[in-house]
Image (tube, helix red, strand yellow):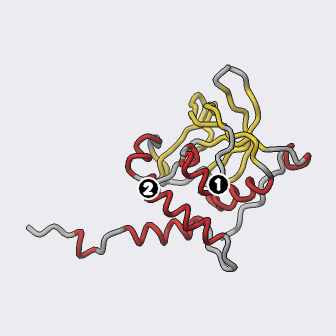
Amino acid sequence: MAQAPPPAASAADVKGEPHTVFVYGSLMAEEVVRAILKRVPPAAPATLPNYHRFSIKERIYPAILPVENKKVAGKVITGVTDHELRILDAFEDVEYTRTRVEISLTDSSETMADTYVWSDAEDPNLYGEWDFEEWKKLHMKDFLAMTLGFMHGLEQPESKTRVETYQSFMQQQEPPASETKVEG
């Protein structure tokens, strides 16, 4: 499987300035951001025009792709350092490509931000619309545990990718087939 090319450098990369990142899924939860960055940078509500947030079959996190006349509600995180952006890149792994986008802020102003766009625009596993509030109720606790495991693994000499960590974590959460049968 071919690796995606590294994302294009943003203006902040070149100047060493803090980054602005638009988040729209699990990273809207402060607990997840804190687990990854070891702090919660300033954030504000924002909207990404002409994109849609999809659910992904057999995943509990979303994907975004460009879709004309749609919009994605999320947050803009400001003051992200170069080091923190590299950590976010590792967390988002090869499933996403960091992309520079124009977002709308609540005061109707617009600004540029980095965001993570699903790498496979033709993915047949994308469907419907992902719901953050539903995710918080049903999946945040397990996702946070997986995230903490991933972050611990990053510190190890032979760390797993976030996708590998997610897949092995979710396999551990599934009950054995014998427990899922219903006796009639």
Residue in front for this viewpoint, 65 or 83: 83
**Image vertical order of residue 43 relative to residue 14, above or below:** above
Q: Where residue 2 sits in the image (x, y, percent)?
A: 69, 68
Quarter holding the N terminus is bottom right
Residue tagged 2: 141
How far apart are the alpha carbons under marks 1 and 2?
Answer: 23 Å
Residue in front for this viewpoint, 85 or 182: 85
Q: Where residue 21 sits in the image (x, y, percent)?
A: 70, 43
Q: Residue at x 72, y 22 (%)?
A: 109
Q: Is disc 1 surrounded by few (<14), some (14 to 19) or many (20+) residues within 10 Å?
A: many
Q: What's the residue type where badge 1 is placed?
A: Tyr
Q: Where residue 85 sits in the image (x, y, percent)?
A: 74, 53
Q: Residue furthest right?
A: 15
Q: Residue at x 55, y 67 (%)?
A: 149
Please indicate whether residue 108 sits to the left or right of residue 162 in the image.
Answer: right
Q: How many marks?
A: 2
Which of label 1 and label 2 is nearer to you?
2
Circle 1 SS class: strand
**Image vertical order of residue 11 relative to residue 59, above or below:** above
Residue in front for this viewpoint, 22 or 82: 82
Answer with the quarter of the image where residue 19 lies.
top right
- Residue 96's tag is 1
Query: Who comes first in sequence, dot 1 or dot 2?
Result: 1
Q: Residue furthest front?
A: 39
Circle 2 SS class: helix
